């Protein structure tokens, strides 16, 4: 064993990792299948065992009910005879009188009434009246096998003036069957006790015990209240022995046993040989296994046919549709052998070609349109703004305020260079803030307003790349649509996880909600011509185009208290090399 394991380990070291994984997976799968099979066998065995036990118990219950019904029928007939006043009167006359016409009449009436009762109860076999002192038998319905005696056989159930006996051999002539019987004392005013004796008309063995038997080798024993065997079909359990049913074990002397107890206290026990019982269980298990294997085989064959002819081609076809939904138009369409799908696949090929061509055309048109629109917006500088700024520069020159003039022209130059220069579409947040400050300075010189500008920027986002020209429109919006003469503008920039949040707040007039919706969502909104002429709608479109709807812009405003614009864009880590 050790040598075999060593050879296996050496062989495993020579194979590739992929083969090792395959071998280990196969061994694990075999172990799992074996474990599952063991669990399934154990579960199936328990289910079948419980099913077989239920069948045995049900069969035994039916036998017990049949015996109870037979005993009840005999007791009922004995009650009919015992409670018949007419029968008692005629019997007293018959026994008390000497031979006469009246005695003969009583005899005939007794005979007729007994025949009527027996005819209406076919479950009764032999019946007779027995006078104890004289040992005389009267009115018997069939011939007797031997002289009758009250010592009938094993006592099955003892009652008041009535006992049930059996099973015992029938006392009827020419009958060797085992029957049940009832002996009841009649309430007759006579010098001796008179009894009615009734036998069942059924053979206990063939008519009761062997009917609907589960196993042919099943044998039965009957026990009384004291658990003494009063009837036995098995030589290992003799009449007179005690069968202890309080023992928890379900096996005795090589037999499984099942018990059914009547309300009167007696019980019937079925004995089944253990070998026969196990053979029956195994046979059931084999049948179930065969059925399961056949079902699994048919299922595998059907599944393989469905997978090969329908599922696999349709799955490939579905995969192609999914790829096309993900904008992958370069894969080949899978072939199927289903005639109904051939035309559909051909149409799908044509549709892919048309969609691919349309997408290319739309991409080209949209690219051109977007470039033109952005270029137009970038160069959309209001002539009035430039003319008014130059006019302000002229008056500053005339008035001799050369320092203010220098500041004005320097700020204007920086604004024009930053906004219209060929420096790319992205800039750093630091440069964007500097351009915004230049715009504020220029406006303060032009209108002699005092704008209190507060800027708070986190250091970790200062060099992050942002689209060019997104802060100046926000500040311009605050100046022309919010502030009245003097005011305060607060610019706050922070980083929230993977986003940069820029807020521009003023304490001016505020904007109505309807106006905000029109500015943000209406592309044809007419912008102000006072400043640069480019507003919030441009900012929204430029961030959508840059970040593909991963960015957002919100406007919070309250009339008379001011407006706050919140810009949220994805954070992209930047460095100083961007500005060199």
Image: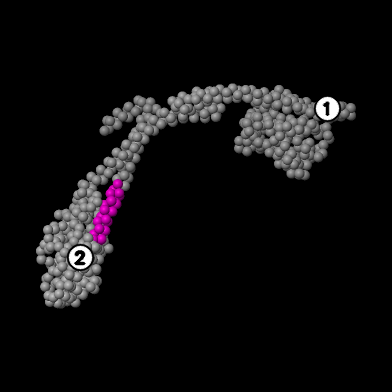
Q: Position of residue 422 (x, y in %)?
A: 71, 22
Of the two numbered discs 2 and 1 on the same chain, state the one appearing first in sequence: 2
Nearer the observer: mark 2 or 1; the answer is 2
To which quarter of the image does residue 484 belong? top right
Counting every numbered tag in the picture gives 2
Question: Residue at image x 65%, y 25%?
Answer: 366
Q: Is residue 207 above or below residue 8?
A: below
**Placement of 235 over or under 224, stated as above or below:** above
Q: Is residue 57 magenta?
A: yes
Task: Decide whether residue 459 is among the magenta residues.
Answer: no
Residue at coordinates 30% horizontally, 49% vertically from top-left? 51
Please give the residue where the numbered disc 2 appears in the rendered image.
Answer: 115
Q: Quadrant of residue 206?
A: bottom left
Which of the two residues, 534 or 305, is positioned nearer the viewer here? 305
Q: CA distance from mark 2 to mark 1?
A: 140 Å
Q: Residue at x 66, y 32 (%)?
A: 543
Q: Main secondary structure of the magenta part?
A: helix
- Residue 363 is left or right of residue 522, and the answer is left
- Around disc 2, counting alpha carbons within 10 Å, would you say few (fewer than 14), some (14 to 19), or many (20 or more)? some
514 lies left or right of 133: right
Give the residues drawn in magenta, as a range: 48-70
243 or 340, which lies in front?
340
Q: Quadrant of the N terminus?
A: top left
Q: Nearer the viewer, residue 376 or 275?
A: 275
In the image, residue 552 lies at what x, y percent?
65, 36
Q: Residue furthest right?
A: 399
Mark 1 — residue?
A: 387
Q: Nearer the viewer, residue 90 or 100?
A: 100
Q: Which residue is pictured at 83% across the width and 35% down the height? A: 448
Examine the rendering and report whether any part of residue 299 can be seen.
yes
């Amino acid at each position: 064993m050790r040598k075999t394991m060593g050879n296996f380990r050496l062989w495993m070291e020579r194979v590739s990792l992929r083969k090792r994984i395959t071998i280990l997976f196969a061994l694990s799968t075999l172990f799992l299948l074996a474990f599952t099979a063991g669990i399934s066998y154990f579960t199936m065995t328990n289910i079948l065992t419980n099913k077989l036990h239920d069948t045995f118990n049900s069969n035994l219950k039916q036998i017990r009910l049949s015996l109870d019904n037979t005993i009840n029928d005999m007791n009922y007939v004995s009650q009919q005879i015992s409670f018949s006043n007419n029968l008692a009167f005629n019997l007293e006359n018959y026994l008390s009188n000497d031979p006469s016409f009246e005695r003969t009449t009583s005899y005939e009436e007794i005979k007729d009434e007994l025949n009527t009762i027996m005819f209406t109860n076919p479950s009764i076999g032999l019946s007779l009246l027995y006078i104890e002192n004289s040992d005389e038998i009267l009115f018997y319905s069939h011939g007797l096998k031997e002289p009758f005696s009250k010592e009938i056989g094993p006592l099955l159930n003892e009652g008041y003036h009535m006992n049930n006996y059996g099973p015992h051999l029938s006392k009827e002539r020419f009958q060797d069957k085992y029957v049940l019987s009832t002996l009841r004392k009649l309430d007759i005013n006579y010098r001796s006790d008179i009894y009615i004796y009734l036998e069942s008309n059924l053979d206990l063995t063939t008519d009761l015990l062997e009917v609907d038997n589960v196993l042919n080798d099943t044998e039965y024993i009957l026990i009384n209240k004291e658990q003494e065997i009063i009837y036995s079909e098995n030589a290992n359990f003799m009449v007179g022995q005690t069968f202890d049913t309080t023992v928890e074990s379900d096996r005795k002397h090589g037999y499984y046993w099942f018990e059914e107890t009547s309300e009167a206290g007696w019980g019937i026990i079925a004995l089944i040989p253990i070998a026969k019982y196990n053979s029956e269980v195994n046979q059931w298990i084999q049948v179930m296994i065969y059925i399961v294997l056949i079902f699994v085989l048919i299922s595998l064959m059907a599944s393989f046919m469905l997978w090969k002819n329908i599922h696999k081609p349709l799955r490939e076809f579905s995969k192609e549709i999914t790829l096309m939904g993900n904008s992958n138009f370069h894969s080949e369409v899978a072939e199927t052998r289903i005639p109904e799908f051939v035309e559909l696949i051909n149409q799908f090929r044509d549709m892919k070609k048309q969609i691919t061509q349309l997408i290319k055309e739309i991409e080209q048109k949209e690219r051109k349109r977007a470039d033109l629109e952005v270029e137009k917006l970038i160069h959309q500088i209001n002539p009035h703004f430039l003319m008014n700024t130059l006019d302000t520069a002229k008056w500053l020159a005339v008035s001799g305020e050369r320092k203010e003039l220098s500041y004005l022209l320097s700020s204007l130059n920086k604004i024009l260079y930053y906004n219209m220069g060929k420096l790319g579409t992205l800039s750093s947040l630091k440069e964007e803030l500097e351009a915004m400050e230049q715009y504020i300075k220029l406006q303060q010189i032009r209108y002699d307003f005092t704008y209190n500008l507060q800027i708070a920027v986190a250091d970790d986002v200062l060099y992050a790349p942002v689209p060019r020209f997104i802060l100046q429109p926000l500040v311009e919006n605050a100046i022309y649509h919010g502030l009245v003469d003097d005011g305060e503008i607060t610019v706050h920039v922070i980083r929230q996880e993977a986003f940069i949040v820029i807020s521009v707040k003023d304490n001016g007039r505020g904007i109505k909600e309807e106006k905000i919706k029109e500015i943000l969502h209406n592309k044809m909104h007419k912008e102000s011509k006072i400043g640069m002429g480019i507003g919030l709608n441009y900012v929204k479109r430029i961030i959508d185009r840059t970040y593909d709807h991963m960015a957002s812009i919100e406007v919070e405003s309250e009339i008379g208290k001011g407006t706050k614009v919140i810009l949220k864009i994805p954070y992209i880590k930047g460095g100083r090399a961007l500005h060199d």
